[in-house]
Amino acid sequence: MALIEMIGVRKTYRTDGLELHAFSTDRLEIDRGEFVCIAGPSGSGKTTILNLIGAIDFPTAGSVTVAGRKTRGLSPADAAKMRRDHIGFIFQSYNLIPVLTAYENVEYVLLLKGLPAPERRRKVSEALASVGLKDMMQKLPKEMSGGQQQRVAVARAIVASPPIVLADEPTANLDSVTGRDLVGLLHRLNLEQGTTFVFSSHDPVIIEHADRVITLQDGRVANDRRC
Ligand SMILES: Nc1ncnc2c1ncn2[C@@H]1O[C@H](COP(=O)(O)OP(=O)(O)OP(=O)(O)O)[C@@H](O)[C@H]1O
Ligand SMILES: [Mg+2]
């Protein structure tokens, strides 16, 4: 069984009595260890796919199965537990907590998991070192550049070693050199730790680095190619 399976999925949104088709697929599978980029124009359904995989949103019809568990029908508490145990999120806008230092932002994930202090210290230091921020642990987000903040967000997403990392346009707010460095970093984590990465991007430089590119058009898979 694939790590991520979407079968007969249809996702629609209802606004002002109108039904809007956001994404559908007969079958889409992503295996453990893949480094996948979801590409496609604005409004084509990229964020919708990531939200469906991340149990942030649920299909209108069909099933999304992640690590052997169907997301539909999960209680809010079970969906939260699934996200905590299986998924790291990287958002376009970083979503760091402004009053916490880089260290505390990353540690927060491990506090939620109830890890003891010595283990937290070790894992947070390792995660921040792996993104090249060993010397910035005590900085607040506002004292860091966009690229540095995004790397804190990466450290936060990987600190608990989740099997899946979802990243929604992680490079959109970065200059092209920083963006390329970030994707290189994610790729290294993918190769070294076997983490499955699914990210969305319309940045051609980023798309170039992916092992598989799923291109969406009007909420459907228009192209699915391994590179
Ligand atoms: N919560 C929502 N309510 C209603 N419609 C929505 C909602 N979220 C997304 N949509 C619609 O679903 C479609 C797909 O949106 P989605 O956010 O997945 O696109 P996207 O490919 O991520 O676009 P972008 O590149 O601009 O981020 C769009 O037409 C959008 O307007
Ligand atoms: Mg989007």
Image (spheres, rainbow, N blue to C red):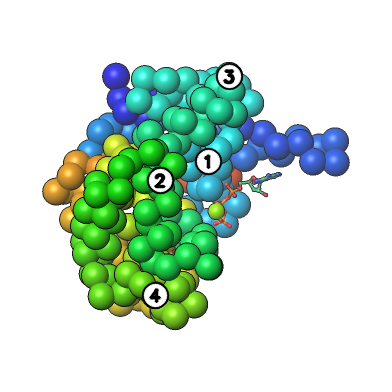
Q: Is residue 117 visible?
A: yes
Q: Secondary structure at mark 4?
A: loop
The residue that mark 3 highlights is 73
Q: Residue furthest left?
A: 192
Q: Are marks 1 and 3 in contact (CB under 8 Å)?
A: no
SS for callout 3: loop
Q: Mark 4 or mark 3, which has the lower sequence index? A: 3
Residue at image position (37%, 54%) is 107
Rounded to the nearest whole Å, what is the CA distance between mark 1 and mark 2?
Answer: 24 Å
Question: Three-letter amino acid code at disc 3?
Answer: Gly
Q: Earlier in the sequence, mark 2 or mark 3?
A: 3
Q: Which residue lies at the image location 18% right of the left edge and 44% below the top edge?
A: 193
Task: Estimate how packed mark 1 is, as few (under 14), some (14 to 19) or many (20 or more) residues with alpha carbons within 10 Å.
Answer: some
Q: Position of residue 183 (x, y in %)?
A: 29, 62
N-terminal of the pair, mark 4 or mark 1, is 1
Q: Residues within 10 Å of mark 2 (few under 14, many from 20)?
A: few
Separation of residues labelled 2 and 3 (CA atoms) = 27 Å
Q: Is mark 1 within 8 Å of ligand 1?
A: yes
Element assignment for label 1: helix
Q: Nearer the viewer, mark 1 or mark 2?
A: 2
Say which quarter of the image contains residue 165: top left
Q: Which residue is mark 4?
A: 139
- Cα–Cα gap, marks 4 and 2: 19 Å
For marks 4 and 3, give the one nearer the viewer.
4
Quarter of the rendering containing residue 58: top right
Residue at the (29%, 19%) spot, across then down: 1
The residues tagged by marks 4 and 1 sit, at their Cα atoms, a distance apart of: 30 Å
Q: CA distance from mark 4 to mark 3?
A: 41 Å
